[in-house]
Image: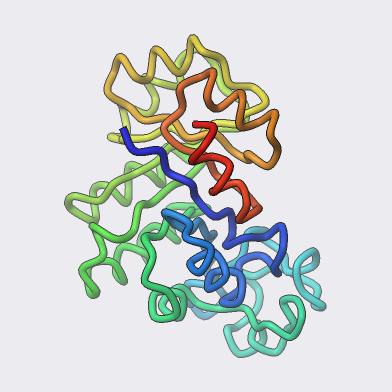
Amino acid sequence: MTFLTIGHRGVMGVEPENTLRSFVQAEQAGMDAIELDLHLSKDGALVVMHDPAVDRTTDGRGLVSEKTLAELRELDAGEGERVPVFEEVLDAVGSPLQAEIKDVAAARALAEVMLRRDLARRVEVSSFHDGAVAEIAQLVPGVRTVLIAGRWGGDVVERAKAVGAATLALNIRRLTLEVVEQAHEEGLKVIGWVVNTQDHLRLVRALGLDGATTDYPEIRRAGRFTA
């Protein structure tokens, strides 16, 4: 089975997260896929940013949903980078993408782009929200989906199956062999996040994970050897 190394918000450990610069660096580092996050702007643009607010990652203040794309474009997203929209990422890199959607509204906007550009093979869609995963699966035939969880109960595998997810992306610090084995028995893949150290890589190997999300490009090289 192929072990996948996924660049977290590009390679956010060395470049400004969720920027074109970070995504290009992730591709150049040979990441198998690149993870990014999507929110809707006030005027409906599919904006690449992790937080609901711009405060942490830019020099601005306020919610993404309360700013137009033009207003977001004026912000510095780190080292002079600008806040990108999803289609700019599609054009800037050729790598497979894992797009995390924050709500059902973003799922619908993403579905429109995916259908128009025939992206079901290239773009895997993930979310912490069961409803958003179910929504994108309904809107985009054949899309691959991932259910993400930081904390979870004993029903997490059943939740993934219920919304048609093929993969679980789970917090490496809370992940147990029991959950991994249960997921594998049901035909689901399991990805650990965020894997940034040799100790994390040893745990990845011990648990028999299918992949890892990381902030650092060097984890890909180490992961090939370890996992």
Q: How is the image coloured?
A: rainbow
- Residue at the spot 28% in from the left edge and 34% down from the top edge: 164
Q: Classify residue 109 as left or right of residue 204.
A: left
Residue 193 vs 21, above or below: the answer is: above
- Residue at the spot 60% in from the left edge and 23% down from the top edge: 203
- Tell which of 45 and 25 is nearer to you: 25
Q: Classify residue 89 as left or right of residue 197.
A: left
Instruction: Residue 175 in the image: state x and y as whole percent.
Output: 58, 21
The residue furthest top is: 178
Point out the image quarter for the N terminus.
top left
Instruction: Residue 54 in the image: state x and y as whole percent.
Output: 73, 69
Count of residue discs: 0
Residue 169 vs 88, above or below: the answer is: above
Among the 4 quarters of the image, the one containing residue 57 = bottom right
- Residue at the spot 23% in from the left edge and 57% down from the top edge: 121
Q: Classify residue 164 as left or right of residue 14.
A: left
Residue 9 vs 145, above or below: the answer is: below
The residue furthest front is: 225
Instruction: Residue 226 in the image: state x and y as whole percent.
Output: 54, 32
- Tell which of 129 and 94 is nearer to you: 94
The residue furthest left is: 141
Instruction: Residue 143 in the image: state x and y as whole percent.
Output: 25, 51
- Tell which of 175 and 62 is nearer to you: 175
- Residue at the spot 46% in from the left edge and 22% down from the top edge: 208
